[in-house]
Image (cartoon, rainbow, N blue to C red):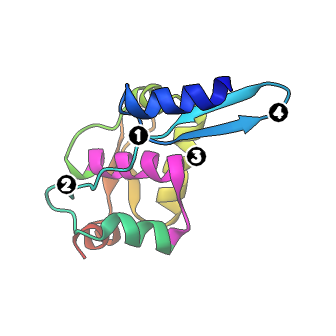
Amino acid sequence: MFLARLKNKSDTEAGLPDVRFKFDTFFTVTFQRPLEPRTPKKGFSVNFRENFSTNFMVKGRQLERMLAAIEIVAGGKILNVADLARVFQVSPRTVFEDLRRLQKWEILAFEGPPKTGRYALTETGRKMITR
């Protein structure tokens, strides 16, 4: 009965989307917002996100982290691993692993010495974001 009231209350009063319940020894209530249509960043093709996800078999939070890194580098900004890790609430090691994959796929390249170098978009990466 409590769960039914919670579901009805969340729908009407708060204007929240449908509630998803998970039952184990405890229960978890998850409110999931509907995805908003994204407008592509300047210089990025409309289908870049979908194409990247399909071509490299990446989805979810990892996709979000990788796209954020590509957008930062493509915008000419310095990619700060610690800031990216803090924003996505993951360890810096996870971000480095994502960057390593992007390097392996020849989308990003690290230029310069280890301490003062920076990530740059490769020619393959430039072509990919504009297609």
Q: Main secondary structure of the magenta part?
A: helix
Of mark 4 and mark 1, the one earlier in the sequence is 4
CA distance for labels 3 and 4? 33 Å
- Measured as percent of width and height from the top left, residue 117 is found at 36, 39
Residue type of the residue flagged with mark 3? Glu
Residue at the image point whose x is 43% and y is 48% from the top: 64
| Nearer to us in this view, 87 or 82 | 87
- Measured as percent of width and height from the top left, residue 101 is found at 54, 57
Residue at the image point whose x is 28% and y is 44% from the top: 72
Depth-wise, is mark 3 or mark 4 nearer the camera?
4
Residue receiving disc 2: 41
Q: Is residue 18 left or right of residue 108?
A: right
Residue receiving disc 1: 113
Depth-wise, is mark 3 or mark 1 nearer the camera?
3
CA distance for labels 2 and 3? 24 Å
Q: Which quarter of the image is occupied by the C terminus? A: bottom left
Q: Which residues are magenta?
A: 56-73
| Nearer to us in this view, 124 or 2 | 2
Of mark 2 and mark 3, the one earlier in the sequence is 2
Whether residue 91 can be seen here: no
Of mark 3 and mark 4, the one earlier in the sequence is 4
Residue type of the residue flagged with mark 2? Lys
Dot 3 falls on a residue whose secondary structure is helix
Q: Which quarter of the image is occupied by the N terminus? A: top right
Local packing at callout 3 (Cα closer than 10 Å; few below 14, some 14-19, many 20+) is few
Residue receiving disc 4: 24
Dot 4 falls on a residue whose secondary structure is loop
